Image (spheres, rainbow, N blue to C red):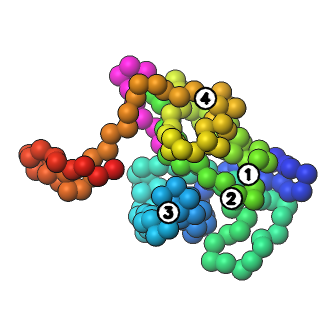
Amino acid sequence: MASNASFQWTIRPATREDVPSIIFLAKALAEYLFGPNTKTTGEKEILRDGFGERPWFHVLVAELTSDKPSSSTPHNDRIVGYAVYYYTYSMLQGRSLFLEDLCVKEEYRNCGIGTALMQECAKLAREEGCTNMTWQLMDWNAKAKQFYERIGADIKKGWLTMKLTEPGLGNLASGGSSTNKSA
């Protein structure tokens, strides 16, 4: 358990019961990064893909242990942050932990919660024999960049992110070539 002057929290693996809270925070993150009405993954898919027989990803949550929830909402107000991660492999570097999302409610930022989530991810990476942790951030997100630099990360210069979405994904899968230009 960790604490700040006014509240305490713990970092733990998420459970199925945490999914509504994770979705609530993910929607806020998506709106911040991409604007209002950004589509996010639904509860059914998250339950299937993260909490089913063969999880595609894992989630850690930051949960308040000393502060009362502020309202009666369908999600748990005690969940104030999360980290979504999964394991990948590189023929050059071996095992890696990829951090897909890191989100902390705005009113709980700069209190150590983001650092605690990153530390737990780093511990898990070491336990699994990973040689590194990798993640991406929007190039305009100066606060996130400063945070990551403070914990010792550096920008991988010379690398670009490539993404193939529909209809290009379907075109390529069916033997054609993609002319998809979407991000």
Amino acid marked by disc 2: Lys
Q: Give SS at disc 3.
A: loop
Pointers 4 and 2 in contact (C-beta within 8 Å) = no
59 w.r.t. 48: above or below: above
Q: Amino acid at mark 4?
A: Ala
Distance between the Cα atoms at labels 4 and 1?
19 Å
Type of amino acid at the residue the image marks with label 1: Arg
Compared with residue 93, is residue 175 higher up or lower down, i.e. above or below?
below
Q: Nearer the viewer, residue 58 or 140?
A: 140
Q: Which residue is mark 3?
A: 35
Which residue is identified by label 4?
A: 153
Q: Looking at the image, is 78 positioned above or below residue 74?
A: above
Crowding at dot 1, Cα within 10 Å, few <14 / some 14-19 / many 20+, comes out as some
Question: Which of the 4 image quadrants contains residue 128?
Answer: top right
Name the residue carrying label 1.
109
Instruction: Compare residues 153 and 79 and report the one nearer the observer.
Output: 153
Mark sitting earlier along the chain (3/4): 3
- Residue 16 found in image quarter: bottom right
User: How far, Cα to Cα, is label 1 from label 3?
Assistant: 20 Å
Most foreground residue, 163 or 60: 163
Position of 39 with respect to 59 (left or right) is left
Q: Are marks 4 and 1 in contact (CB under 8 Å)?
A: no
Q: Residue furthest front?
A: 140
Report the span colored magenta: 85-94
- Check residue 91 for magenta coloring: yes
Q: Could you tell which of marks 1 and 3 lies nearer the N-terminus?
A: 3
Residue 123 visible in the snapshot:
no
Alpha-carbon neighbours of circle 2 within 10 Å: few (<14), some, or many (≥20)? some
Which residue is at a point 75% across and 59% down the rendered structure image?
Answer: 107
Which label belongs to residue 105?
A: 2
Residue 99, how many percent across, how many down? 52, 41
Return the x and y of residue 106 as percentages of the image width and height: 70, 58
